[in-house]
Amino acid sequence: MQFPEIVYSVPIEEIELSKNIKIAFHQDGSGDYELIFVHGLATNLQSFSKLIPQLKDNFKCFAIDLPGYGKSVAGTHSADQKFYSEVIKNFIKKMNLKNPVLVGNSMGGQISFSTEINFPGTVKKMILLAPAGIEIFSNSDKEWIKKNFNENSFTNLSEKQIRASYAANFFIVPDDVEILIEERLKLRELKNFHNFTKVVVNSLYGLLEQPVHNNLKNIKSDTLIILAKNDRFIPNTLLHPDMTVKGIGELAKQLNPDFKIITLNNCGHLIPFEKPEATTFFIKEFLNS
């Protein structure tokens, strides 16, 4: 377990997916659809702590910690898209899920895309919240990101910088985000923090080196993409200052006209934490249609 010292507010179970890969997950609720919540970069399943309580009466919910994150297997790994998509596929198979729906936020969105691309037909539907994977990064973009985001830069973030990075995820910062911030600050003191740092950096590089945008046209699963009008991360405002959230939605429709696109106003990147009520409404509407 990467961080046994961290206390979650919900009960956690473990499952062994393959040799040396054991992941932690929280499950709750009941219903015909089985929602699998896939978190973003440098976070964990608690990103969905405000969303699942609003969905559990209608759907069976599974929030997972990806390997190397939270309470899943300790150590380091490639953290690339192929690896993570295999994790999702194996979880669905091991849990014998019949109607799986991927709900991915940010990096979890690109992992969801990758799962359907690498293993077509694995999921029934996808609901992607501010997903990575649509925006196109040039080789020079990738070089800039790798130069400015590496193990040292992540490890050496000050408390002020960590708080600022969390604040950047929201249009209006919720008071209860302090729980996530305090957890993130505590990680720096734990024995596996260096391994976690490597996993986070590998995860980011995996997003860059195994892009999905050219294969989005091949996705057949019904897909809802929920964007945030005030997102500061997608699109990348530093590398692509002329690109807008509206432009991301338009690009997604160009890549796959079957995608359904919704944009939430007054909302930042961490959609399930800032706008759980609105997100719940659109999830229910999409799955019940």
Image (spheres, grey):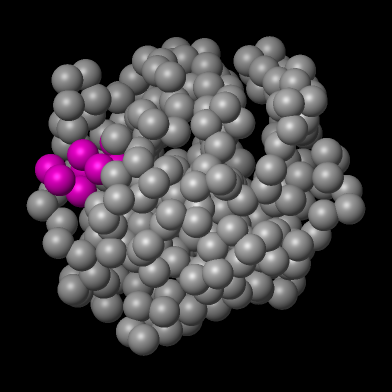
Depth check: 16 or 220 in front?
Answer: 220
- Name the residue at 74% across, 33% down: 138
Locate residue 91, reporting x and y percent: 22, 43
**Which residue occupies the foreground of this view, 223 or 232?**
223
Above/below status of 182 relative to 232: above
Would you place residue 241 above or below residue 140 in this image?
Answer: below
Count of marks overlaid on the render: 0
**Magenta highlight range:** 87-94
**Residue 238 position in % (x across, y down):** 85, 40
**For this view, does 123 lie left or right of residue 235?**
left
At 49% from the left edge and 71% from the top edge, which residue is drawn? 258
Asked if residue 131 lies left or right of residue 174, the reply is: left
Judged by its main secondary structure, the magenta piece is: helix
Q: Residue at x 16, y 31 (%)?
A: 16
The quadrant in which residue 19 appears is: top left
The C terminus is located in which quarter? bottom left
Q: Position of residue 124 (x, y in %)?
A: 28, 64
Can the viewer see residue 51 in this picture?
Answer: no
Residue 169 belongs to the span the image colors magenta: no
State whether residue 80 is above or below residue 92: above
User: Horizontally, is 285 left or right of 207 in the view?
Assistant: left
Q: Which quadrant holds residue 98?
A: bottom left
Q: Quadrant of residue 271?
A: bottom right
Residue drawn 29% across the image and 44% down it: 119
Picture coordinates of residue 285, whole percent (x, y): 42, 84
Position above or below: 47 against 268: above
Residue 140 visible (yes or no): yes
Rendered-image quadrant of the N terminus: top left
